[in-house]
Amino acid sequence: MSLFEINNVGKSFGDLKVLHDISVKVEEGEVVAIIGPSGSGKSTLLRCATMLETMDSGSLIYLGEKAAQNDAQGRTVYASPAELRRIKGYFGLVFQNFNLFPHFSVLRNLTEAPVHVQKRDRKEVEKEALELLAKIGLSGKENYYPQQLSGGQQQRVAIARALAMKPKMLFFDEPTSALDPELTGEILKVIRQLAAIKMTMVIVTHEMGFARDVADRVIFMDGGYIIEEGDPHDVISNPREGRTKQFLARFSDQGMDID
Amino acid sequence: MMFLSIVRQIIGGFGTTLLLFFFTLLFSMPLGILFAVARMSKFKPLQMFMQVFISILRGTPLMLQLIVVFFMPFYVFGLKLSTGWRLYAALIGFSINYAAYFGEIFRAGIQAVPTGQREAAEVLGFTRMQTFWRIVFPQMVKRVVPPVTNEVITLVKDTSMAFAIAYAEMFTMAKQVAAQMSNILPLFVAGIFYYVFNIVVAGIMGMIEKKLDYFE
């Protein structure tokens, strides 16, 4: 049984079809990177997977539990809100713009959902949150407010906030795109640490070198289709498809360091 | 001595003005939240009803609205209007009218909270109620303090409109005293009361604004 499964997703915004019959399975402990030009549908796919966007057709399954499935007409039908809230406990999402809660301290950003959604003991949750902050190198920042932190620190807090829910897997939506280049390193380091402890992750990214090093599998998307998928060294260093080659060539043209 | 007796009489009216002021705030703010939420409802008929309702409340004189509320029991239910009813009629009229203004301010404040905040809360599994009260509401409050301050200051002065239904607040008293004495001094004294009270109100609102400075 796969940890995560999204099958035959179709999604349109008005007349524009942004996802064509996409299927992705992720096994426990796997790190999957999704790459592709902007407008390729990779972020929409992530938003469908995390239920921020509803699918027109297709099914969504976490640990064998159906969050959404097709009805007889091939239209997506979602489970009940309570059921969906429970399934949302299986995954965490890290946003491009962090989306920390500005009115909460760092500590409360981490503890609010475990205490009020998962109804766990506050003392225990706070203890774990402090341990998490130590792991990401933010000990002593628990009483700071998000605006007092750098972008890189905010994104690390956002990762910790997702981890505080003890999810089975994490989604990252271009986690370094809103950061200055010198700050991306600290985020990539945290993701590497998570990969080392076998955290299941799906990462939408433009960091090709990082995707190749850290991912077990790379998916290249364009125009709402999966063009190529496989071992990162094959897809990024020796792409088979013309469209993939073209996309990756543009990255080296811009002097971006793929190695 | 004349001055002191003027002040004493006006202080009597100031109490009723305070009463009207505080209870109007107490009722109109929660009602304003309700108005804002209803106005943003996905249920079209409710949304449209609120739009028209708020438009009428903002587009007609408060004085007229007070009169309508005051005479409503008589014309609609044929009830006899008691003296005590004046206060309740004033409170109802003011609260609903101010709720319309607060509602629009709150709506703007709610809509100014970035979508990402709601999405982050949604992914963390918060219910819609939790998302509103824990995430959206506190951020809305911070944003609406300056426009709410404006309304609150206006309310201090607007309480004088209760004279339309002969509710004996401070301005009504001041006018009576002025008429008895054939002297406008009582009106000036009332003006000083309004001004000092508003300085206090503005000071308190400024403190609230400062207190919310800890986040962006």
Image (cartoon, grey):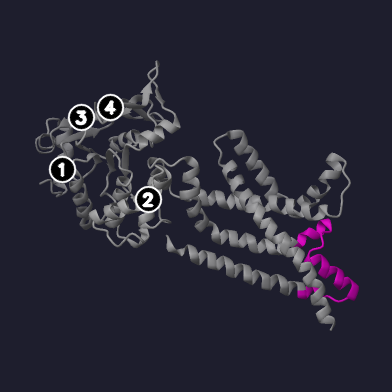
Tags 3 and 1 both on a single chain: yes
In the rendered image, which residue does mark 4 sit on? A22
Per the rendered image, the range of residues in magenta is B160-189
Earlier residue among tags 3 and 1: 1
Q: Is residue B193 left or right of residue B211?
A: right
- In contact (CB < 8 Å): disc 2 and disc 3: no
Disc on res. A111: 2
Identified by mark 2, the residue type is: Thr
What type of secondary structure mainly makes up the magenta span? helix
Kindly report the distance in space between the C-alpha atoms of the residues bearing marks 3 and 1: 21 Å
Label 3: few (<14), some (14–19) or many (≥20) C-alpha neighbours in 10 Å: some
Identified by mark 4, the residue type is: Ile
Earlier residue among tags 2 and 4: 4
- In contact (CB < 8 Å): disc 2 and disc 4: no
In the rendered image, which residue does mark 3 sit on? A227
Q: Nearer the viewer, residue A119 or B215?
A: A119
In the rendered image, which residue does mark 1 sit on? A214
Q: Chain of mark 4?
A: A
Q: Is residue A126 left or right of residue B33?
A: left
Q: In x, y percent, where is residue B38? A: 59, 41
Kindly report the distance in space between the C-alpha atoms of the residues bearing marks 2 and 4: 35 Å
Q: Chain of mark 3?
A: A
Earlier residue among tags 4 and 3: 4
On screen, A128 above or below A56? below
User: Which quarter of the picture shows residue A17?
Assistant: top left
**Secondary structure state at the residue bearing disc 3:** strand
Earlier residue among tags 2 and 3: 2
Residue pictured at 71% horizontal, 70% vertical = B194
